[in-house]
């Protein structure tokens, strides 16, 4: 391998790492706030990419009907809770489970999306997929929010399998690739850098900066940080764990949708492609101990570079090499981490 090939592989690794970093940050956030190991994170990536592909083809994505159906189920669960005498935040429930899905449905049918600008299609896609986050939390996780981590993990696996099956039903088995956000290419020495790669890296950095601003400057961000540090303490201070859960999955779904929009012009995505991408983000999150955002981001960079160089030296085993990274990390953490019971 000469230095020019090494630079090309490094470029590929950094681009992939930008996507893995976003997913790792989402996984760390969800686990820190809710204790959920969120296996379905990758499904938001594939749903986002394929929803955008449907809009580009001028078709109304079936995900909008999935959103409406999920909102109806969530609203019915809130009505049942109200019937049993529990306090229900109806204003929030009606917005997240009725108004937002119906508005999205109306927009989806109001325009010919094949002729609309790309930014409008992306905006609808991200809104649609992000709205799935609070609904997912209300239906599957809120009723068992206090369950052990193992139970939450089992439910996550079930949700992942359900979303993969629904993805096959509504998108079909065919793969899609969306239009690039930037067609130009730039020559830098031996590198031929596509504009889409610059979009991926730039958008990821901007999104990470926005998340840092959100968590440090906004009331909701500080509430999520407080919940991540001490859930019981946050509850005593009046921070609703249900609101924190819905907001966390809203952010995770939005990050997944944006990741899908960014990566879909680079590679063909199928209904089940998000799982493998999400797993690589999960490896990075594990490197960060599901607790540290900076270390998870560095772990994503390591995963991206190792994957790129493994594809050159041993392409048939690149996935195995990447996932094997978990073993020494888990071994090290098992030796150095002390079990602490939550108060």
Image (cartoon, grey):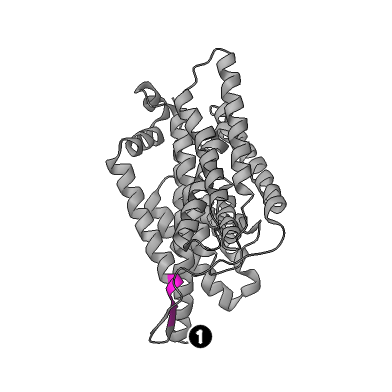
Residue drawn at the location 40% of the way across and 54% of the way down = 295
Q: Position of residue 201 (x, y in %)?
A: 40, 65
Q: Which residue is mark 1?
A: 1
**Residue 195 forms part of the magenta stretch:** yes
Magenta range: 192-197
Residue 304 showing in the rendered view:
yes
Q: Within the image, what quadrant is residue 140 found in?
A: top right
Q: Give whichever of 183, 338 is nearer the camera.
A: 183
User: Image point 55% across, 36% down: which residue?
Assistant: 135
Q: Is residue 311 magenta?
A: no
Judge the density around disc 1: few (<14), some (14-19), many (≥20) Cα neighbours within 10 Å.
few
Residue in the foreground of this view, choosing between 214 and 26? 214
Give residue 184's position: percent from left, percent from top.
43, 78
Comparing 229 with 76, the one in front is 76
Position of 80 compared to 190: left or right?
A: right
Judging from the image, what secondary structure is the residue with disc 1 in? loop
């Amino acid at each position: 391998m000469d230095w020019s090939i090494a630079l090309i592989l490094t470029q590929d690794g950094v681009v992939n790492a930008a996507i893995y970093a976003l997913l790792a940050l989402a996984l760390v956030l969800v686990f820190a706030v809710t204790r959920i190991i969120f296996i379905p994170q990758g499904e938001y990536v594939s749903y986002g990419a394929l929803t955008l592909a449907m809009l580009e083809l001028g078709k109304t994505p079936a995900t909008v009907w999935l959103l409406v159906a999920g909102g109806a189920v969530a609203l019915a669960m809130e009505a049942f809770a109200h019937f049993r005498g529990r306090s229900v935040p109806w204003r929030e429930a009606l917005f997240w489970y009725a108004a937002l899905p119906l508005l999205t449905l109306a927009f989806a049918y109001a325009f010919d999306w094949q002729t609309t600008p790309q930014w409008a299609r992306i905006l609808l896609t991200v809104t649609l997929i992000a709205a799935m986050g609070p609904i997912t939390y209300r239906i599957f996780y809120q009723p068992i929010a206090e369950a052990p981590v193992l139970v939450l993990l089992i439910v996550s696996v079930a949700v992942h399998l359900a979303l993969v099956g629904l993805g096959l039903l509504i998108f079909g088995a065919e793969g899609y690739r969306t239009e690039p956000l930037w067609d130009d290419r730039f020559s830098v020495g031996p590198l031929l850098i596509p504009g889409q790669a610059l979009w991926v890296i730039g958008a990821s950095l901007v999104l990470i900066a926005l998340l840092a601003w959100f968590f440090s400057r906004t009331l909701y961000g500080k509430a999520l940080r407080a919940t991540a540090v001490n859930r019981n303490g946050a509850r005593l201070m009046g921070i609703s764990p249900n609101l924190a859960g819905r907001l966390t999955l809203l952010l995770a779904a939005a990050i997944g949708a944006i990741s899908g929009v960014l990566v879909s012009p680079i590679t063909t995505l199928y209904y089940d492609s998000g799982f493998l991408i999400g797993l690589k983000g999960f490896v990075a999150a594990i490197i960060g101990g599901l607790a540290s955002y900076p270390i998870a981001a560095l772990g994503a960079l390591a995963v991206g570079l190792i994957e790129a160089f493994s594809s050159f030296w041993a392409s048939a085993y690149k996935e195995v090499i990447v996932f094997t990274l978990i073993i020494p990390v888990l071994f090290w953490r098992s030796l150095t981490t002390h079990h602490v019971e939550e108060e």
